[in-house]
Image (cartoon, helix red, strand yellow):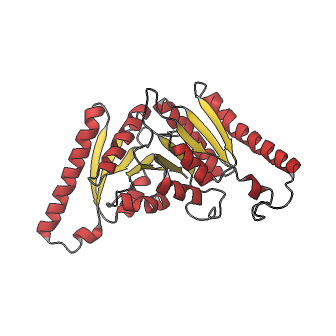
């Protein structure tokens, strides 16, 4: 994407589920728009083959081939000119995907509310371990009505947020979609009112200063990218709400929410920020987590 080398593929985890096929179709669309190759990867968990006999192992391999063939045919029917390769790896699912991420431009897995199969159940673990941006595909709640659904990106003051913004601009251009840049900021907590239960006097002057600074910071982040992408349709959203809830609300009308892997919440120092982790579970569309 933003700094993609032509040989870096978009890698999609395939497990035979409808969610993984949806992920493959979405990744293929993006790969076509970005002139990147697509790799369909099927991992056979070690628990399935380590104790199996030769015949059982052959059956697992054959099943993997069938799963990949179905996914490849599905992708090629919509994108006949796309460079597509397939790969079967024996090993733990999240580990296999993390290994593939070292040479990938983007890693995509599918998941859904009722999908607890191999890849859906490993979505968070995969995001933790991957070395590249990870897309967790979920069919959007909103329905397209002529023009593409928006791409939403959450921003704050973190470096990961800046990288997420750059990725979001690039993806929105590729998908010809509006880009909604959202800064969710809990104002009460920021001015020291978060634990007063609504009691006490609000320092309105301080509040106004803080809001102004946050809006200026958003403009500073967005302006260089609007120059790089002059045709971008950018909408800015600034709300007094928790980032997780605010972005989840926006996801109901979007096709993708992009966030940095480290936020400024309580878990900002963890491997995966609290906002990203919450969105993976609760967003009503796909989520892209950017390191």
Name the image quarter holding residue 113. bottom left
Q: 263 or 250, which lies in front? A: 250
Q: What residue is shown at x 34% (from left), y 66% (from top)?
A: 92
Name the image quarter holding residue 188. bottom right
Q: Is residue 47 above or below residue 36?
A: below
Q: 154 or 170, which lies in front? A: 154
Q: 193 or 88, which lies in front? A: 193
The residue furthest bottom is 51
Residue 104 appearing in the image:
no
Whether residue 19 sits left or right of residue 255 in the image: it is left
The residue furthest front is 199
Q: How many marks?
A: 0
The residue furthest left is 55
The residue furthest top is 231
Residue 165 appearing in the image:
yes
Q: Position of residue 23 (x, y in %)?
A: 36, 46
Q: What residue is shown at x 69% (from left), y 33% (from top)?
A: 223
Whether residue 160 sits left or right of residue 18 in the image: it is right
Q: Position of residue 216 (x, y in %)?
A: 76, 40
Q: Position of residue 146 (x, y in %)?
A: 43, 26
Whether residue 107 sits left or right of residue 55 in the image: it is right
Q: Position of residue 64 (x, y in %)?
A: 22, 55
């Amino acid at each position: 994407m933003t700094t993609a080398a032509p040989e870096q593929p978009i890698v999609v985890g395939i497990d035979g589920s409808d969610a993984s096929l949806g992920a493959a179709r979405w990744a293929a669309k993006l790969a076509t728009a970005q002139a990147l190759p697509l790799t369909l990867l099927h991992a056979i968990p070690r628990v399935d083959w380590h104790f199996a006999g030769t015949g059982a192992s052959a059956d697992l391999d054959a099943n993997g081939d069938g799963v990949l063939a179905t996914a490849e045919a599905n992708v090629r029917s919509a994108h006949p000119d796309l460079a597509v390769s397939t790969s079967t790896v024996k090993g733990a699912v999240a580990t296999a995907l993390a290994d593939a991420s070292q040479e990938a431009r983007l890693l995509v897995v599918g998941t859904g509310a009722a999908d607890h199969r191999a890849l859906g159940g490993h979505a968070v673990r995969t995001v933790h371990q991957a070395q590249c941006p990870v897309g967790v595909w979920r069919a959007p709640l909103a329905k397209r009505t002529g023009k593409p659904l928006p791409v939403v990106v959450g921003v704050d003051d973190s470096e990961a947020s800046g990288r997420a913004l750059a990725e979001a601009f690039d993806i929105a251009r590729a998908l010809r979609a509006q880009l909604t840049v959202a800064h969710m900021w809990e104002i009460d907590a920021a001015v020291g009112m978060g634990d007063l239960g609504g009691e006490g006097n609000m320092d309105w002057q301080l509040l106004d200063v803080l809001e102004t600074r946050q809006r200026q910071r958003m403009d500073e982040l967005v302006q260089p990218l609007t120059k790089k992408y002059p045709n971008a349709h950018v909408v800015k959203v600034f709300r007094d709400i928790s980032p997780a809830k605010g972005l989840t609300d926006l996801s109901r009308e979007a096709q993708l929410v992009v966030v940095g892997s480290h936020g400024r919440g309580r878990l900002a120092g963890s491997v995966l920020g609290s906002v990203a982790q919450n969105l993976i579970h609760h967003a009503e569309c796909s989520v892209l987590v950017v390191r």
